[in-house]
Amino acid sequence: MRKNLGFRLRSAVAATVLMTGIAVPALQAETLADAMAYGYENSGLLDQNRALLRAADEDVAQAVGALMPVLNWQAQAQFDYPESPFANISVGNKNLTANLFLSASLTLYDGGLTRYGIDSQKETVLATRFGLLQIEQQVLLAIVQAYMDVLQSYELVNVREANVRLITQELRAARDRFEVGEVTRTDVAQAEAQLAGARSDLAFEQGALVRAIEAFKAAVGREPRNLQPVAVANIRQSVAEAKSIALQSHPALLQAQHQVSAAEINILRAQAAMNPTVSLTARAGVDEVFDQVATLGVQVTGPIYQGGRLSSQVRQFIAYRDAARGDLLTTARQIEQNVGNAYSYLDASKARLDASDRQVRAATVAFEGVREEATLGARTTLDVLDAEQELLDARTNQISAQIEEVLASYSLLATMGLLTAQALSLNVQIYDPTAYYNLVDDAPTVTSEQGRALDRVLQAIGD
């Protein structure tokens, strides 16, 4: 039965469209890796979070910009009327004043406030990168789930169709035997009732197949294409080894670690806000009589009293740090639990599949025996129908166990932090989260060569 999972989905789609009357062309084969690769490259959720990462990169650029010189210009023109605005005003009795100035300032010292701000934003960027990796795992796991749901739905449709055909044969045989007086009308009615129930179950599974295909389209971004069999993910680690890997590489844990680091730096940043700031200032221009004006000076500012606001911010960031540490501890424990649960689920799935294989073999022998005995008059039609139902239940359990084993293996990879495009070696262009950061980390201006390169990158992303 496990080989039966290597089905041709075009038959599934054909069975589905029989209800809609739409013709379906032949489709190329598609593996789980193909589906994950396509979903990775066409995921709106990944695009959304990549854009959020780029926004976080820009926070670093803005923090770096605070260390650079600030240049501004100012132009002003003003008309002054010496007389009342209600009097007769002529051009000759109004005065025109105008000036143009350029100003510059550069922070020389701020107690580390700006530098801590840069470091904090860098930690936030790293946390956001691992958050993106966690989203990637969720996207790929959803694709695995959708892929296996289509496989399972198609197999169940096949089983239900075979069941309908078999009961139809049993009903035909019961009617023939009723005509010659070998069975009663009750036997025929029992077969008719069983057939009606089988047709109802078939209609339900056909509807489930349609819904599974829709879920696949939502997860992957296109309709399934002749899906191929899926092997259980190759996992050689023990439970302890899997937990160790997860605690070292799971993106959710690494994200939490960087969030703690950012919170700790923010405490230092809040404390630095109490220090004085030293700035170099310069101003040059022409006034209303076209005299040249130029000034150069040093400005020192610092807080004296702000109603306890700065002290409150320090305490607030300490509280945020403590909360981030608590989240880190909770995340680590949750990851360990998830790995243990996933391993248990995988072991249970393997045991269930082994038991269901034996159940199918035994139920097949029993059904064939009961049906043969029925032809000799030693069994009733109800006995045959009951044996057929037991075989149907066994096959259904076997299909579910096969699907669950595959899902459990990929879920275990996700709990270990290994369900990523790079770890799975998918045939895709791996998204580089550092590429955009390296273009903006030194805060380039729009007129620089690097700024123009950024414009081209953003245009390409938009297209």
Image (cartoon, grey):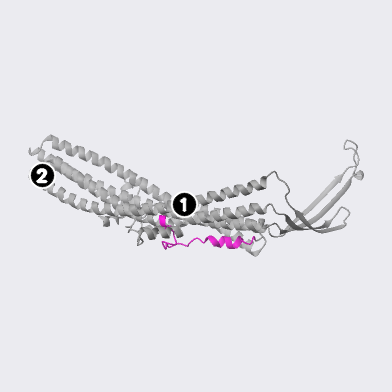
**What are the residue bounds of the magenta stretch?**
414-443
Residue 103 vertical position relative to residue 79 in the rendered view, above or below: below
x, y percent for residue 143: 40, 53
Is residue 138 visible in this depiction of the protein?
no
Q: Which sits in the foreground, 376 or 125?
A: 125
- For the stretch drawn in magenta, the main secondary structure is loop
Front one among 312 and 152: 312
Ranked by sequence position, the earlier of labels 2 and 1 is 1
Q: Is 432 within the magenta? A: yes
Let me know if residue 106 appears in the view: yes
Report the side of 107 relative to 452 (left or right).
right
Q: Name the residue rendered at 15%, 49% in the picture.
A: 366
Q: Cβ–Cβ below 8 Å for labels 2 and 1?
A: no
Quarter the N terminus occupies:
bottom left
Q: Amino acid at mark 1?
A: Thr
- The image shows residue 194 at horizontal and vertical percentages of 20, 39
Q: Magenta span has 190? A: no
Looking at the picture, tell me which residue is in the foreground, 335 or 83: 335
Mark 2 or 1: the one toward you:
1
Q: Which mark is residue 331?
A: 1
Secondary structure category for the residue under label 1 = helix
The image shows residue 223 at horizontal and vertical percentages of 39, 52
Q: In the image as oriented, which residue stretches furthest toward the bottom?
A: 449
Count of marks placed on residues: 2
The three-letter amino acid code for the residue at tag 2 is: Ala
Tell me the quarter of the image containing the C terminus: bottom right
The single residue placed furthest to the right in the displayed view is 92
- Callout 2: helix, strand or loop? helix
Relative depth, front residue between 365 and 198:
365
Question: Which quadrant of the structure image shows residue 269?
Answer: bottom right
Q: Which residue is mark 2?
A: 374
